[in-house]
Image (cartoon, helix red, strand yellow):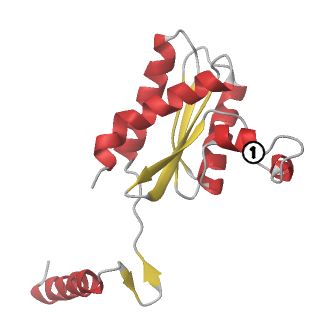
Amino acid sequence: MRPAAAALVLAAANALAADGGGTLGGTYAVRLLTPETALKAAQAALAKCRAQAFQVSVAVVDRSGITQVLLRDRFAGPMSIDIAQRKAQTAASLRMDTSVLERETQPGKPAAGLRRAPSVLALGGGRVIEAGGALVGAIGVSGAPGPANDDTCAAAGIAAIAEDLEF
């Protein structure tokens, strides 16, 4: 790197560090999952389900709901792919675990109408992934017998990366 370019990069880094809040003008800094961390979470969720003889699909999305990793075990049903992604996207978009959403959107509850929103899937198995109190992504699992089992596998995926997310 040329000395002038290096000085410019250093000046920008110092200005950002001096800002303290991570904002500079009209922008702000965000934390994102690395592909390696997303893959580690997906593999751990898949391993947890396999240990219970469940064939599933696992999706990990970034904070915007864009898929980073998608794994389908060899005998997982074809619909499990879409369902895992929708669970992860729902958790990321609404910033809540889908098992909570499932309870809060039952008929007669104030949020019941969310179940009719396009792409929302109010079934357990989608969990938010947070680091330092901020949303960094979500994980969705589909294919185990029942949403509670999907949720257990998703929790195992998050547990596997918990140390990686601490800062």
Asked whether, in this view, residue 33 is left or right of residue 6, the answer is right
Q: Where does the N terminus fall, quadrant-wise?
A: bottom left
Viewer-side residue, 64 vs 9 = 64
- State the residue at coordinates (20%, 84%): 14
Quadrant in which residue 23 is drawn: bottom left
Residue 52 percent across, percent down from the top left: 51, 11
Q: Position of residue 67 (x, y in %)?
A: 55, 47
Q: For this view, does 118 lie left or right of residue 133?
A: right
Q: Tag 1: residue type?
A: Glu
Q: What residue occupies the far right of the structure in this picture? A: 108
Q: Does residue 2 appear to the left or right of 109 in the view shown?
A: left
State whether residue 36 is above or below residue 132. Answer: above
Q: Give x and y (percent) for residue 61.
A: 53, 47
The single residue placed furthest to the left in the displayed view is: 3
The residue under the point 44% across, 33% down is 157
Nearer the observer, 108 or 146: 108
Which residue, given by chain and number where applicable, does mark 1 sit on?
104
- Residue positioned 39% across, 46% down in the render: 35
Q: Quadrant of residue 43?
A: top left
Say above or below: 68 vs 31. above
The answer to whether any part of residue 42 appears in the image is no
User: Is label 1 in a helix, a strand or a loop?
Assistant: helix
